[in-house]
């Protein structure tokens, strides 16, 4: 796992330097080196930071089925939102809030996504 964390750190640095096109190599390597849940969530978060929601959602798909978590649902909501899938993103954010009701970041994410949905009373 140390090698996977090292590749993740390299990817993080490359993203911060604006080298997203190079960082994806290290992100893929980190994801393939370990099945650690926390590391996989970190990889998904960096995919989102790199503006690559499809890769983030791929990373989260099996992880969320096996080990659902509030952070995972929040990341899924962000990825879905970036991909323009707002209703699905809103549902994922709602689950994150349900799992961690005191988490203000999850609540803000849900509110932001709900503001993008058409008003339900006008249907």
Image: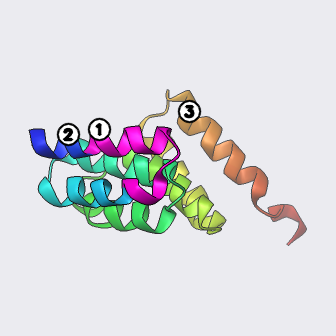
Nearer-the-camera pick, 121 or 93: 93
- Determine contact: label 2, label 1, CB under 8 Å: yes
Q: Which residue is mark 3?
A: 105
Q: Which mark is nearer the camera, 1 or 3?
A: 1
Residue where numbered disc 2 is placed: 6
For the image, the number of numbered tags is 3
Residue 117 lies left or right of residue 26; in this view the side is right
* Dominant secondary structure, magenta: helix
Residue, far bottom: 123
- The residue lying toward the viewer, choosing from 72 and 8, is 8
Q: Is residue 46 above or below residue 117?
A: above
Disc 3 packing (10 Å; few <14; some 14–19; many ≥20):
few
The span from disc 1 to disc 3 (Cα, nearest Å) is 24 Å
Front residue of 118 and 78: 78
At a point 26% along the width and 50% down the height, the residue shown is: 40
Residue 108 picture location, percent across and down: 64, 36
């Amino acid at each position: 796992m140390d090698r996977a964390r090292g590749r993740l750190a390299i990817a993080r640095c490359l993203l911060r330097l604006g080298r997203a096109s190079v960082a994806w190599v290290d992100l893929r390597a980190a994801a393939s080196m370990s099945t650690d849940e926390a590391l996989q969530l970190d990889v998904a978060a960096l995919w989102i930071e790199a503006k690559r929601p499809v890769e983030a959602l791929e990373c989260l798909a099996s992880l969320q089925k096996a080990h659902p978590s509030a952070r995972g649902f929040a990341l899924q909501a962000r990825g879905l939102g970036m991909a323009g899938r707002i209703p699905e993103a809103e549902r994922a954010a709602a689950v994150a809030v349900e799992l961690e009701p005191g988490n203000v970041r999850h609540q803000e994410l849900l509110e932001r996504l709900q503001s993008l949905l058409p008003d339900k009373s006008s249907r």
